[in-house]
Image (tube, rainbow, N blue to C red):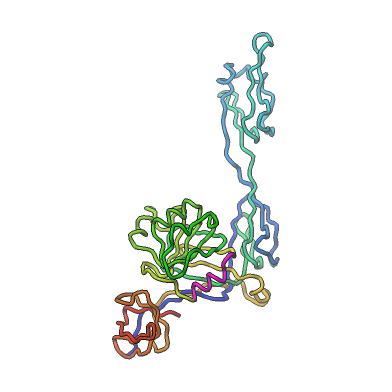
Amino acid sequence: MESITYKRKPFQEGVPYQFERTLDSSSNVNVKVGELVRPESILATTWYKSGFRTFNLGNLFKLPPEKLDAIIKRTVGSRVYQGDVIAQRKEFFGLRERTFKSPLTGDIVNYDKESTRLTLQYLPHEVKVVSGVFGKIVDIIPQKNIAIGTVVDAVYGIVTFGTDREGSLLEIGYPDIPLQEDQITEKAAGKIIFGGTKVSIEVLYKALAMGVKAIITGGIDYQDYLQLRSSKGRFEDVGISVVATEGFIIGPMYSAVYEKLKEAEHRHVFLHSQKNVVVLPLPNSKIASLDSINLREGRLAKHRGYGILIPGQTVRVLSGDNVGQYGVVENAEDTNIVVKIREIGVKIRKEFLEIIE
């Protein structure tokens, strides 16, 4: 009789994949379809408006609306710099001046003569849309996105929370012990870090204070998870994101997963929370000619399901004395499956096992 149980794929290798970079109506695109790009390539430049301030000139100068036109020195549409005189009035027979100087660098975008309110718009700031990966431009939808095709490895988590993140990958701590607060230092700021058998709430708060973007680790306590998860849902931005590759089971990451992360250290990687995946773009040296790969068809495989237990399979123990341990199936003919863990054969119920592909 076949023994069916849970099945999971903890990672994938060499998968065609597409990244999308967002554009808006003000984006100037610098690339074209078919162009090869590097991680530092600037795909587009976008200008974002940065807000405004409003000033009541009538109150400032104690004048009625009809008398303000004579003292205003700049017109709507003018560019002004911090300290420039916008309006000036001579008082006491010219012996004293009352002046309104621009408190910011920006543009005069409106003046309402009835309310005497003058509006200054901050100068827009430039944002460069960077590739982040080696790849090829496969599609451009103006004012929407640019699609980059490349080849990636992927590491799957069992539990994730927080929003999507991207950044440089950095190893912290050791694979076989929990992460410690003193391991989170300034060098982790702005990084996605990985390591340890678990992350505690104290370590998470330290990482949040240090500006860490995300943590990839073995497990997380369920109560800590509930405390940190946003009341709006687990994919809201809580300041930091977490991927637990072993879920609520505290233990080392699967060795092959840890090696994949180790290989990608210092590269730019992407965490997609709702897909429970960390995407590891391959370096240019490991990618065959992109012309020979159908980059439009790239898809990550379904990583969870069910399978039939057979001898020789790697499995993970989900419950009981050996919870979190990995072993190899020796005999799958009975309800209690014989699994070799650390050179010892152990009988475990099939529903307490998970096949590792």
Query: Within the image, what quadrant is residue 4 found in?
Result: bottom left
| Residue 93: quarter of image | top right
x and y, in percent, of residue 80 in the image? 68, 32
Can residue 6 be seen here?
no
Q: Camera-side residue: 209 or 145?
A: 209
Residue 331 placement (x, y as % from top left): 35, 90
Q: Which residues are magenta?
A: 256-266
Residue 330: percent from left, percent from top: 37, 89
Left or right of 173 in this view: 98: right
The residue located at (61%, 30%) in the rendering is: 103
Considering the image in quadrants, where does the C terminus appear? bottom left
Rendered-image quadrant of the N terminus: bottom left
Residue lying farthest to the top in this orientation: 93
191 relative to 74, above or below: below
Secondary structure mainly formed by the magenta segment: helix
Count of numbered circles on the image: 0
